[in-house]
Amino acid sequence: MALNEQEILEGLAEIVNEETGIETDAVQMDKSFTEDLDIDSLSMMTIVVNAEDKFGVRIPDDEVKNLTHVRDAVNYINNNQG
């Protein structure tokens, strides 16, 4: 069963929290991973791998650079899930 945007956002927020300690409610659609949430490239790659596992999607390396905001990641997962 496909998840909706809110469920994806909540799952992504949990992954970000586990990796960085950032509160889940700080992970919002309009936030930039690097500027607002201060996530570095190494943490971002871990988040991507964990998101792939959690949501059953494949996020190619060349696509990761396009995921600058939380909304970008949520939309990508939403459009590519099972």
Image (cartoon, rainbow, N blue to C red):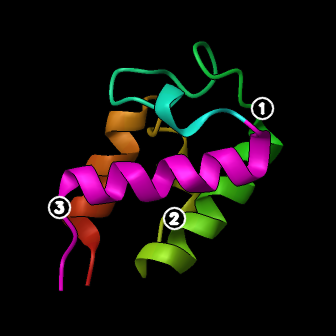
Q: Quadrant of residue 39?
A: top right
**Could you classify mark 3 by the number of other residues whose Cα lies within 10 Å: few (under 14), some (14-19), or many (20 or more)?**
few
Q: Are marks 3 and 1 in contact (CB under 8 Å)?
A: no
Q: Earlier in the sequence, mark 2 or mark 3?
A: 3
Residue 10 in magenta? Answer: yes
Quadrant of the snapshot with the N terminus: bottom left
Foreground pick, 28 / 33: 28
Please name which of the two marks, 2 or 1, marks the residue nearer to the observer.
1
Which range of residues does the magenta coloring cover?
1-21
**Residue 48 placed where, x, y %?**
60, 58
Give the main secondary structure of the magenta stretch.
Answer: helix
Please name which of the two marks, 2 or 3, marks the residue nearer to the observer.
3
**Residue 25 placed where, x, y %?**
48, 32
What is the three-letter code of the residue carrying label 2? Pro
What is the three-letter code of the residue carrying label 3? Asn
Residue at the image position 36 percent from the left and 48 percent from the top: 9
Of all residues, the one furthest to the top in this rendering is 35
**Residue 54 placed where, x, y %?**
51, 75
Q: Is label 2 in a helix, a strand or a loop?
A: loop
Residue 60 image label: 2
Residue 19, compared with residue 77, is above or below; it is above
Instruction: Report how far apart the C-alphas of labels 3 and 1 lie in the structure.
Output: 27 Å
Badge 3 is on which residue?
A: 4
Answer with left or right where residue 3 lies relative to residue 15.
left
**Residue 65 placed where, x, y %?**
54, 39
Residue at the image position 48 percent from the left and 53 percent from the top: 12
Badge 1 is on which residue?
A: 40
